[in-house]
Amino acid sequence: MAYTEIGKLMDKWVNDPNFRKDLKKDPETAVLKMGVHLNKEEMETLKQVDWNCSDEELGTRLSKFFS
């Protein structure tokens, strides 16, 4: 994934609590709805995130996932 796409995803995560809720509920739909394009492997990785963590922990894990 291009770093611009990662930046969009992370910016939305940090600044939009509704996006965080949507991402926790249905990651694929939330990402597609915001217009970020992930390849199949990246989407599968995102779906494997443990969404029971705090928002802060999830932000850290997501940034490591896609770095």
Image (cartoon, rainbow, N blue to C red):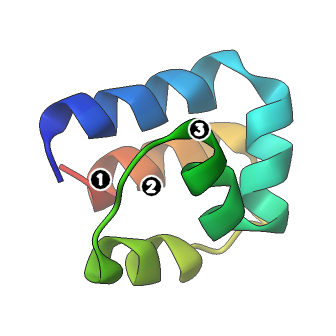
- Residue type of the residue flagged with mark 1: Lys
Instruction: Identify the residue position indicated by label 3 in the image.
Output: 34
Please state which of residues 3 and 52 is positioned toward the viewer in this rendering: 3
**N-terminal-most mark, 3 or 2:** 3
- Vertical comparison of 25 with 30: above or below: below
Instruction: Identify the residue position indicated by label 1 in the image.
Output: 64
Measuring from the top left, give residue 43's x and y in whole percent.
43, 74
Which residue is found at the position 54% from the left and 83% from the top? 48
Which residue is found at the position 77% from the left and 60% from the top? 24
- Vertical comparison of 20 with 10: above or below: below
**N-terminal-most mark, 1 or 3:** 3
- Residue type of the residue flagged with mark 2: Arg
Quadrant of res 28: bottom right
Mark identifier at residue 61:
2
- Residue type of the residue flagged with mark 3: Met
Q: Decide if residue 36 is on the left or right side of residue 29.
A: left
Q: Decide if residue 25 is on the left or right side of residue 4.
A: right
Measuring from the top left, give residue 31's x and y in whole percent.
57, 52
Viewport quadrant of the N terminus: bottom left
